[in-house]
């Protein structure tokens, strides 16, 4: 079925349109509906990936007589979606992660009813707690009233934005999906509705409104030059004149803003700190999809440009360092993790862009593979740490990482999970971070040994930051002030263990993973001609 | 050769960007974002203009020399998106103001 | 507000609605379309909210329902093309029956019975935009917050 | 302490000169050069879609997904507004 590629975008969209109506009826039905949608979309993505592996790159023309009618007059006139091995693989993987984070959100957001001040142990608090329980039992049987239905609507819409990023081959559609991403993320940031949330949501949206308009300006420049909006035909006609460079700089800066690496990372800690953890996972996925589009545009559409590749390498090194050094002076757990997320994205950019500088060599291909492989590991590692941070906040309600003490005594399992996350993110064997970082180190060495040294140094600093936090949160005697407000739900532990199992299995069998998933993806990314030929025969 | 209309669009974009960078007032930031949006929309619509062209609508059209329709379709989308962003920004601004009052 | 304002605004209510519907329904023939007409229709909600401040209670749920219905109508029209051709295929154009009058190239006076799914999509988007903007106005301008 | 205002002013000056340089490279106003796609639309849109309004046929037929996305943006904004204007507030727990 060739329609899979549009159904994977249209089905979550349809479901999101229906969700406010279902949410009015019943909360449980609504959650079931969201889960069903995510499951269906995940299955579609599996079939789509299989189809892509069988038939090669797929192009789907929206509104044409038949889907493969891409260029009736020798040039495309309609919107075209392209699915190749890279975007199909990323969609498959992202949907899996999103489904896990959805399961996580079910439990975590349920707990947010229990918001009575149980800090004092008197009878009044107990009565309030009972009142809250009663309220829940009412709300479960009747309609939703706490905004969870709106949360899940925005959740699905953000997913649509991410999938649109992955499959679109049209510059203006890219702009539209960019806006869907920004607005849905703004809503998710403001979910808890306190002053901090509103402020960071306002800053986020103001920055991204200007950023998306810059993207549109760049698209307009390309349109004035070539008269088309399709990426493939622009890639075919590209001349790299001055206007093209300006357009590339505008589009790339908007995408770097969305990805949140070096020059424009300032929104990240604020936004991640304010939004609930399941939304943070989705936000990381959205950043990664923006990076995918950045690679796609800068290397497939605009072709190889040495200076741009060097600028990207510079940015990646600076983001590795900026992330770590800014994390050193923070004390809020989620802010620290968001700075580390910036530095992890730096490795992805370092791998892929240095791979393109060494194109047509073996180490260059390996660097691209390493970068794309690190995309997978980034979301697993950073996602795991964020999930654990969410659990810690859920049970202790303390945001300052240095105020929590002695968690290992009370929750040894949590300490173990966190330790796995620390080892994986800092690239120690035998976990997944080691596999991809090793590939990046080895291959980047052929471009310049300095890059490898800097990258290893960054990893060591990440380890230093995280060991400090681990010692402060988990070690030592538990203090009297930190009381548990919740027990850890079993489902949450199961989800985190799925993450751990995935990380272990990738870390133990990296070769198999790379040859079966990452290798076709990297081949799809480097062949510009293949991308053009899928539209213009 | 620099056309006057493109210069105007650049002026609007620069004014909007500087407003978004320097102003602290939330409403003024929203206005700046809108000014940038107006500049970019004007830029796009100016790209599609052909001298002496009429609107690309065949109903009782005065002539068949028509301006490029694609930019018009694009800014139609872009304007509505700007509207949505403005609405969300304004309601956030109202909420921040109310939180400050308390 | 004063009685004069209320009465005058009630008088202007009908022409505004009719003008908005005209813009929506002639979207495929004249300048205009779903968005523009929807905005004009939504201006009624703002007029009512400004003029009848506390006397009238506009239902948020109704607007929300219509917004979702408009969007579902829109995406269903897009889905219907998928069965035989592709997503967003204009399956009604040039089919001689409902909205399918064949148009030849050139200047003409405009036929309402043409355009395929475009008038239907205009209608769907018109419903969606009108109710969405009304809902935004109601949410921001209503005195008391809702639960 | 670094003077952020000066940096901002300098970058803004750079930005505006860059933009002025950019528009000097554009095709002159009123004479777009790359018009293949637009000419195709003007020539064929009326016959293919049966709609006299070429812009309307682009918005709903040739570039339908953009319009769907645009409606989605409006829907998303409404969802966001109705979420943040809710009265009930809870402590942040994750």
Image: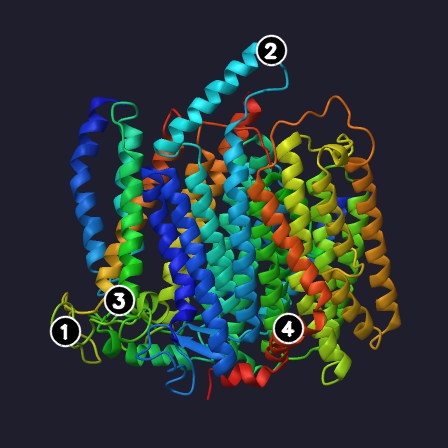
Q: Do the residues indicated by labels 1 and 3 lie within the same chain of the protein?
A: yes
Q: Which residue is mark 4?
A: A518
Q: Chain of mark 3?
A: C
Which dot, 4 or 3, sits closer to the camera? 4
At x 57%, y 28%, the residue is D91
Q: Chain of mark 4?
A: A
Q: Do the residues indicated by labels 2 and 3 lie within the same chain of the protein?
A: no
Q: Nearer the viewer, residue A449 or A480?
A: A480
| Mark 1–mark 2 distance (CA, rounded to whole Å) | 77 Å
Callout 4–callout 2 Cβ contact below 8 Å: no
Image position of A92 with respect to A384: above or below:
below
Let me know if residue B22 appears in the view.
no
Disc 1, SS = loop
Q: Do the residues indicated by labels 4 and 2 lie within the same chain of the protein?
A: yes
Q: Do the residues indicated by labels 4 and 3 lie within the same chain of the protein?
A: no
Instruction: Please identify the quarter of the rendering in which residue C83 is found.
Output: bottom left
Q: Residue C129 placed where, x, y %?
A: 32, 49
Sequence-first disc among 1 and 3: 3
Let me know if residue A439 appears in the view.
yes
| Mark 4–mark 2 distance (CA, rounded to whole Å) | 57 Å
Sequence-first disc among 4 and 2: 2
| Mark 4–mark 3 distance (CA, rounded to whole Å) | 36 Å
| Mark 1–mark 3 distance (CA, rounded to whole Å) | 20 Å
Q: Which residue is mark 2?
A: A122
At x 38%, y 38%, the residue is A27
| Mark 2–mark 3 distance (CA, rounded to whole Å) | 62 Å
Q: How crowded is the residue under tag 3: few (<14 C-alpha within 10 Å), some, or many (20+)?
A: some
Q: Residue A435 placed where, x, y %?
A: 75, 66
Left or right side of A368 for C28 = left
Q: Which residue is mark 1?
A: C101
């Amino acid at each position: 079925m060739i329609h899979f590629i549009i159904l994977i975008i249209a089905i979550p969209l349809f479901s999101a349109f229906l969700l406010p109506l279902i949410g009015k009826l019943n909360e449980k039905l609504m959650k079931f509906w969201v889960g069903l949608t995510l499951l269906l979309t995940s299955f579609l993505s599996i079939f789509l990936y299989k189809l892509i592996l069988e038939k090669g790159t797929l192009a789907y023309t929206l509104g044409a007589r038949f889907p493969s009618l891409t260029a009736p007059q020798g040039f495309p006139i309609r919107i075209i979606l392209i699915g190749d091995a890279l975007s199909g693989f990323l969609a498959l993987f992202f949907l899996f992660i999103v489904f896990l984070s959805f399961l996580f959100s079910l439990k975590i957001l349920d707990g947010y009813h229990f918001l009575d001040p149980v800090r004092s142990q008197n009878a009044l608090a107990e009565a309030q707690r009972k009142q809250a329980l009663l309220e829940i039992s009412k709300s479960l049987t009747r309609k939703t009233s706490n905004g969870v239905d709106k949360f899940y609507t925005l959740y699905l819409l953000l997913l649509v934005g991410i999938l649109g990023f992955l499959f679109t081959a049209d510059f203006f559609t890219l702009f539209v999906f960019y806006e869907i991403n920004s607005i849905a993320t703004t809503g998710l940031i403001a979910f808890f509705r306190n002053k901090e949330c509103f402020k960071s949501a306002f800053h986020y949206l103001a920055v991204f409104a200007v950023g998306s308009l810059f993207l549109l300006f760049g698209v307009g420049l390309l349109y004035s030059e070539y008269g088309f909006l399709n990426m493939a035909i622009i890639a075919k006609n590209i001349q790299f004149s001055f206007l093209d460079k300006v357009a590339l700089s505008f589009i790339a800066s908007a995408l770097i803003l969305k990805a949140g690496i070096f020059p424009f990372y300032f929104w990240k800690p604020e936004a991640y700190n304010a939004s609930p953890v399941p939304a943070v996972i989705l936000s990381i996925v959205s950043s990664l999809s923006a990076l995918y589009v950045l690679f796609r545009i800068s290397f497939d559409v605009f072709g190889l440009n040495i200076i741009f590749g060097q600028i990207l390498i510079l940015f990646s090194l600076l983001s590795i360092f900026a992330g770590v050094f800014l994390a050193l002076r923070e004390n809020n757990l989620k802010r620290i993790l968001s700075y580390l997320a910036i530095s992890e994205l730096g490795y992805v950019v370092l791998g892929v862009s240095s791979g393109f500088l060494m194109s047509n060599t073996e180490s260059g291909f390996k660097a691209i593979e390493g970068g794309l492989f690190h995309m997978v590991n980034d979301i697993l590692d950073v996602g795991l740490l964020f999930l654990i941070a969410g659990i810690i906040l859920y049970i202790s309600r303390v945001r300052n990482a240095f105020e929590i003490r002695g968690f290992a005594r009370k929750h040894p399992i949590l300490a173990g999970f966190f330790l796995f996350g620390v080892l994986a993110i800092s690239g120690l064997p035998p976990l997944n971070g080691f596999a991809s970082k090793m590939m990046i180190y080895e291959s980047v060495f052929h471009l310049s040994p300095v890059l490898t040294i800097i990258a290893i140094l960054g990893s060591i600093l990440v380890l230093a930051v995280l060991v400090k936090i681990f010692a402060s949160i988990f070690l030592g005697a538990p203090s009297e002030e930190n009381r548990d407000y919740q027990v850890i739900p079993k489902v949450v532990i199961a989800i985190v263990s799925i993450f751990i199992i995935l990380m272990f299995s990738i870390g133990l069998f990296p070769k198999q993973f790379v040859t079966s998933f990452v290798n076709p993806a990297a081949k799809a990314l480097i062949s510009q001609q293949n991308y053009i030929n899928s539209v213009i025969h | 050769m620099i056309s006057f209309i493109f210069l105007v669009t650049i002026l609007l974009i620069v004014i909007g960007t500087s407003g978004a960078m320097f102003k602290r007032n939330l409403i003024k930031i929203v206005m700046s974002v809108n000014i940038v949006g107006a500049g970019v929309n004007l830029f796009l619509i100016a790209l599609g203009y052909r001298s002496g062209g009429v609107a690309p609508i065949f109903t009782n059209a005065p002539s068949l020399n028509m301006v490029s329709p694609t930019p018009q379709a694009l800014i139609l989308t872009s304007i509505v998106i700007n509207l949505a962003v403005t609405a969300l920004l304004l309601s956030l601004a109202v909420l921040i103001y109310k939180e400050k009052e308390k | 507000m004063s009685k004069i304002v209320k009465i005058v605004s009630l008088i202007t209510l009908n022409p505004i609605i009719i003008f908005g519907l005209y813009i929506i329904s002639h979207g495929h023939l004249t300048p205009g379309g779903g968005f523009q007409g929807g905005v004009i229709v939504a201006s009624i909600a703002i007029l009512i909210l400004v003029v009848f401040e506390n006397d009238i209670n506009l239902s948020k749920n109704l607007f929300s329902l219509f917004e979702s219905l408009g969007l579902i109508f829109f995406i269903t029209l897009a889905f219907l093309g998928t069965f035989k051709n592709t997503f967003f295929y204009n399956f009604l154009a040039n089919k001689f029956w409902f909205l399918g009058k064949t148009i030849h190239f050139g200047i003409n006076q405009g036929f309402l019975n043409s355009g395929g799914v475009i008038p239907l999509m205009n209608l769907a988007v018109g419903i969606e935009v009108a109710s969405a903007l009304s809902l935004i106005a109601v949410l921001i301008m209503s005195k008391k917050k809702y639960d | 302490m670094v003077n952020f205002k000066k940096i901002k002013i300098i970058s803004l000056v750079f930005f505006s000169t860059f933009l002025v340089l950019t528009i000097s490279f554009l095709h002159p106003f009123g004479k777009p050069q790359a018009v293949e796609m637009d000419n195709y639309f003007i020539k064929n849109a009326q016959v293919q879609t049966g709609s006299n309004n070429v812009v309307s046929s682009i918005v709903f037929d040739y570039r339908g997904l953009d319009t769907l996305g645009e409606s989605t943006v409006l829907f998303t904004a409404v969802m966001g507004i109705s979420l943040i204007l809710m009265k009930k507030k809870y402590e942040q727990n994750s």
